[in-house]
Image (spheres, rainbow, N blue to C red):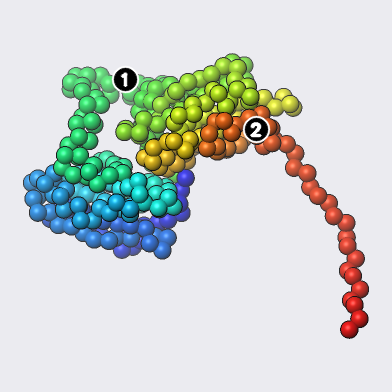
């Protein structure tokens, strides 16, 4: 989902100042009049202690207002933070979530080593950031030799067209990590001879990695409501057999009302990437894109309705009525 909002000239200028001025630690930005605009620049008080400078953000983090924070992690390392508190207005939440990729892309995605999505002010304190760093560091506790071997394997997978876990760039969207087996499962839906006709994907929210949940065989339209997870969001790709014998591919996005706010934001903002991944990387033609709050709402009637011929109501020429007497 893209919002159509773009970065203003003022924001470009303010970010360039942040990049060039090593005494600047934070650049705050928001959305105003359908544009990304700067709010304030905060100078560092402890140039050698990033964690100590995080205390400078506290007065600017409101419990009911979203905010973009572009921060200098070190002299040449920058991080883009999207702060969307739970108490922010719903429309604001969706707008900030759907525009965060645009913000980074327009300012130069190569300048940011990381993107962070926060829903509480506590996450942007020294303690909260250290927990984040520990989590990221714990994702790949590899030795240098293991890292080199992993790099070789990923390079080989890319050379051979494999689907090892790696970052994927799709047209019009930033890159995201795509886990092993995702693209292969999507490509399998093109083969009508295969039994698997329902592929479910999810996002590992902390790492924003697209992962494969399952590839289900012989799923009917009537079984979709019980086959798709009802306790968390899902991206589902379904090969539907129509009465005419065709087998179009449906993209079905479900997001239960019980989903966490952060889940909703990340899934909504990443939906376009997943569709593009299927269409461009897996070369999977998507015939219809459907969205439901709960899998319980999905049924044969709802699916068949999408393919029912639209009846055009024809009306004959009506002769104008004769004006009445005055």
Left/right of residue 25 with respect to residue 65 in the rendered view: left
In the picture of the structure, the residue carrying the numbered disc 2 is 303
Q: Position of residue 141 (x, y in %)?
A: 20, 23
Lower sequence index among marks 2 and 1: 1
Side (left or right) of 56 relative to 283:
left
Q: CA distance from mark 2 to mark 1?
A: 41 Å
Q: Residue at x 74, y 26 (%)?
A: 243
Q: 117 above or below 3?
A: above
Residue in the picture at 42% in, 36% down: 259
Q: Residue at x 28, y 24 (%)?
A: 151
Q: Nearer the viewer, mark 2 or mark 1?
A: 2
> On screen, 111 above or below 209?
below
Q: Which residue is mark 1?
A: 153
User: For the point 25% across and 53% down, which residue is it?
Assistant: 61
Along the line of sight, the residue nearer the viewer: 9 or 210 = 210
Q: Quadrant of the C terminus?
A: bottom right
Apparent side of residue 206 relative to residue 75 in the rendered image (left or right): right
Quadrant in which residue 268 is drawn: top left
Q: Residues within 10 Å of mark 1 (few under 14, many from 20)?
A: some
Q: Is residue 164 visible?
A: yes
Q: Is residue 252 above or below residue 93?
A: above
Task: Assign a secondary structure to mark 2.
Answer: helix
């Amino acid at each position: 989902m893209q919002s159509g909002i773009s970065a203003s000239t003022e924001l470009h200028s303010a970010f360039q100042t942040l990049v060039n001025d090593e005494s600047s630690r934070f650049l705050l930005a928001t959305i105003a009049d359908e544009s990304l605009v700067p709010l304030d620049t905060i100078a560092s008080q402890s140039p050698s202690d990033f964690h100590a400078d995080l205390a400078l953000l506290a007065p600017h983090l409101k419990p009911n207002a979203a905010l973009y924070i572009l921060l200098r992690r070190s002299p040449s390392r920058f991080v883009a933070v999207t702060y969307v508190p739970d108490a922010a207005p719903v429309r604001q939440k969706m707008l900030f979530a759907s525009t965060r990729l645009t913000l980074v892309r327009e300012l130069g995605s190569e300048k940011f080593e990381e993107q962070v999505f926060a829903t509480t002010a506590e996450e942007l304190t020294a303690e909260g950031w250290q927990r984040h760093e520990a989590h990221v560091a714990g994702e790949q506790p590899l030795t240098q030799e293991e890292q080199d071997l992993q790099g070789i394997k990923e390079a080989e997978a890319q050379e051979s067209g494999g689907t090892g876990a790696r970052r994927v760039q799709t047209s019009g969207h930033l890159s995201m990590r795509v886990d092993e087996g995702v693209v292969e499962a999507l490509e399998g839906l093109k083969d009508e001879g295969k039994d698997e006709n329902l592929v479910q994907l999810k996002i590992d929210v902390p790492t924003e990695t697209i992962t494969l949940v399952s590839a289900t065989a012989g799923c009917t339209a009537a079984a979709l409501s019980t086959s798709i997870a009802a306790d968390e969001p899902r991206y589902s790709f379904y090969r539907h057999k129509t009465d005419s014998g065709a087998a179009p591919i449906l993209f079905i996005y479900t997001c239960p009302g019980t989903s966490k706010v952060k889940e909703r934001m990340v899934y909504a903002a990443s939906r376009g990437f997943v569709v593009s991944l299927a269409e461009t990387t897996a070369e999977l033609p998507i015939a219809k894109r459907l969205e439901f709050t709960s899998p319980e709402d999905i049924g044969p009637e709802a699916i068949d309705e999408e393919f029912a011929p639209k009846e055009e109501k024809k009306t004959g020429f009506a002769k104008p009525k004769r004006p009445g007497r005055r």
